[in-house]
Amino acid sequence: MKSVISIVLVDDELLFRQGVKFMINRDENLEVIYEASNGGELLNYLETTPTLPDIVITDLKMPVLNGVETTKILQKQYPNLKIIALTSYDSPSFIANMLDVGAASFILKNAHPEDLIATIKEVADKGFYYNDRVLKIVKEIELKNKTTKSELDAGFLSPREIEVLQLICEQKNTAQIAEILCISPRTVEGHRTNLLLKTDSKNIAGLVVFAIQNKITLIDF
């Protein structure tokens, strides 16, 4: 994890945005480098900035360009950019939609400030962060759609790729996976890249959804 995590904050409510910025900047390892009031302003900024931020935290209900549509565009134009959805909604259908468009994590607007900081650091370190509620919803979606899902063909993923995927689902970062499997971090990154290509996943978060839907990892509640 980088010593300072750069963040862009997108929300149309100025007072709320300033409060979130204040909380984030109190942590010496985090810095809000830009603020936008909607997705359009964010995209304009990203097109002109010489250095992309590590994370975008975006509200979802905004004028001009909302957070859902913004996330879709970011996934196409900046696939390595990690997106945290800042929202007042946590219904299963809503979370499922955000998972599908590529959100790396979710944080409710009424969450404790410590939860926000922890979520940012987890996403920066591991590429995603899903709390127990989100993982439960993913599992529920898999159960509802079980008639449309099929088991993986034998040999689709190598044994080592499956091991790496299981550890990703346990929210281990690259260094931790390398240590557990006694391989180099570069090798771990190679396996992760292969997994993304093979599963047609947008990001690490998509790998977790894929693993649950295909019963590669089991989550008990």
Image: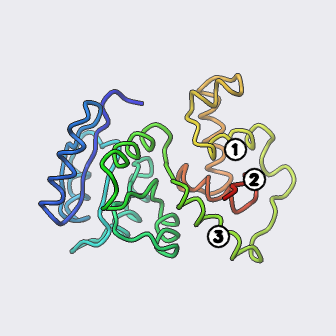
x 72%, y 51%: residue: 217
Q: Quadrant of residue 43?
A: bottom left
Q: Where is mark 2, residue-wise?
A: 216
Q: Real-space Cα distance between discs 3 and 1?
A: 19 Å
Residue at disc 3, secondary structure: helix
Q: Where is mark 1, residue-wise?
A: 166
- The quadrant of the rendering that contains the C terminus is bottom right
- The quadrant of the rendering that contains the N terminus is top left
Q: Real-space Cα distance between discs 2 and 1?
A: 7 Å
- What's the residue type where badge 3 is placed? Glu
Above or below — where is 191 with respect to 19?
above
Q: Quadrant of residue 106?
A: bottom left
How many neighbours does mark 3 have within 10 angstroms: few (below 14), some (14-19), or many (20 or more)?
some
Image spot of residue 107 (x, y percent)? 38, 57
x 73%, y 54%: residue: 218
Marks 2 and 1 close (CB-CB < 8 Å): yes
Marks 3 and 1 close (CB-CB < 8 Å): no
Image spot of residue 88 (x, y percent)? 34, 69
Above or below — where is 74 with respect to 162?
below
Marks 2 and 3 close (CB-CB < 8 Å): no
